[in-house]
Image (cartoon, grey):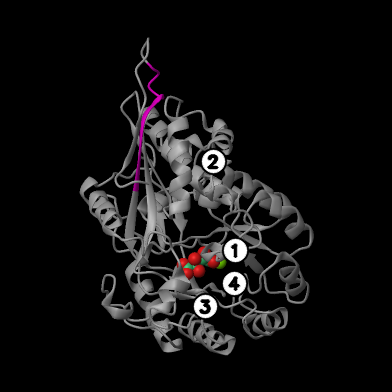
Amino acid sequence: MDGSRLHTQTGWGAGAPAPTTITAIHLTPVLVADPPLLNVQGVHQPYTPRLIVEVTTAGGATGLGETYGDTKYLDLARPLADALTGRRVTDLNALPRLAAETCGDSPAATEAGEVTAGGLRGAQTADKLRLSVLSGFEVACLDAWGRLAGLPVHALLGGRVRDRVDYSAYLFHRWAAHPGGRGEPDDWGAALDPPGIVAQARRFRDIHGFRSFKLKGGVFEPAAEIAAIRALAAAFPGRPLRLDPNGAWSVPTSLKVAHQLRDVLEYLEDPTSTTAHMAEVASRTDLPLATNMCVTTFAEIREAFTRGAVRIVLGDHHYWGGLRATRELAAVCRTFGVGLSMHSNTHLGISLAAMTQVAATVPGLRHACDTHYPWQTEDVLTERLAFTDGALPVSDAPGLGVALDRERLAALHARWLADDGTYRDRDDAAAMRAADPGWVTPRVPRW
Ligand code: GKR
Ligand code: MG
């Protein structure tokens, strides 16, 4: 994307367009401050790219969407914005075809099969890229449609079955600051051992009321991460706990950890990579396994479910292709008796509002959803979404129920414009090299 915001505008031919007709789409890439959170690949960059989508209709509504903002997503978003302009926000079933037509041959879309930093969410393929882009537009269309109709997005999805959605505290081993004074400072301090993780969890509980806790693993030797979970179990007896090393362990290591933590974990998330390895672990432990890595598309469901590889899928409307696809995933999971939760990656309030709207419509959501949101101190909304007792109330306001703060959006976009390219594509291994020049993305299984 060359420079500033992309603005696609339709002409006003003969006859007035329907209020739902899309007259303009703005795409605004932003860089959002992100703390030095550690994972198996490295560390979060000081700034993470996101894309804000604004869809404006002839009826005067503007709908908001948010998705990944790395260059390869931006490259696909631009032609899709062009193709959508002039269509109706209600025409959502046309989105996959339009996306396939407009994104199909682009260089970004043909990088199929390659495992990149996105390896934290399984192999990255052209289909997944396309769906992640499409989801930002789907959410923006639903938001605009809801605003026009005076209905919340959940009503467009069939209505809510709950009035609050539970979220889990997302705990990370982390440094006090990014190397070399980069990024925005915060007062969380370092968390590199079990007492540090427990202190972080207490602070999350005190501020947001979270009742369940997920620890990002794959950073230290499994024994250290087992000790961190044990410390959490002692500090928060009976609370749901999860550990997620993003596929960093071998099958024997996964089984050892499962054995040692089976009395305290709600589930173990992606202990090992590949469906075959997950199935092997699952066949030898009664601890439930969850995934956002081996089941990330509809095509991956059959093998994983028939082999009993996972008992919980963490959906993510970004990479499943939107809110309606998330409901389809939920239906398949229900059919197979597989639980559903929600995965998250660094995101802003638009995505959190979208997650909450769709989660509100899914029956039998028994696991608190993940969210990175509390780590993001910046947002593009006029008001931050606030957790009470670890949950978000489900908004009944039209659309997503959130409003864009143009000054904030402009400030985060200005940061993106000013960036020399260092942070426009998330690369946790590259960020790690700022502290450890010899760092290469570890091969998994690492332990
Ligand atoms: O933000 O470091 C991170 C996470 O590791 C994220 O990238 C994962 O996609 O949170 C995610 C997960 O549950 O695997
Ligand atoms: Mg995960």
In the image, residue 174 above or below residue 341 = below
Amino acid marked by disc 1: Val
Give the CA distance from mark 2 to mark 3: 31 Å
Q: Position of residue 273 (x, y in %)?
A: 66, 70
Q: Residue furthest left?
A: 407
Residue on which the image places disc 3: 440
Residue on which the image places disc 1: 115
N-terminal label among 3 and 4: 4
Residue shown at the point (24%, 49%) measured from the top left: 410
Taking the image as shown, residue 316 lies to the left or right of residue 397, namely right
Amino acid marked by disc 4: Glu
Q: Position of residue 114 (x, y in %)?
A: 61, 60
Per the image, label 2 sits on a secondary structure element best described as helix
Q: In front: mark 1 or mark 4?
A: 1
Give the CA distance from mark 3 to mark 1: 14 Å
Specify few, some or many for label 2: CA neighbours under 10 Å numbering under 14, 14-19, or 20 or more: many
In the image, residue 421 above or below residue 430 = above
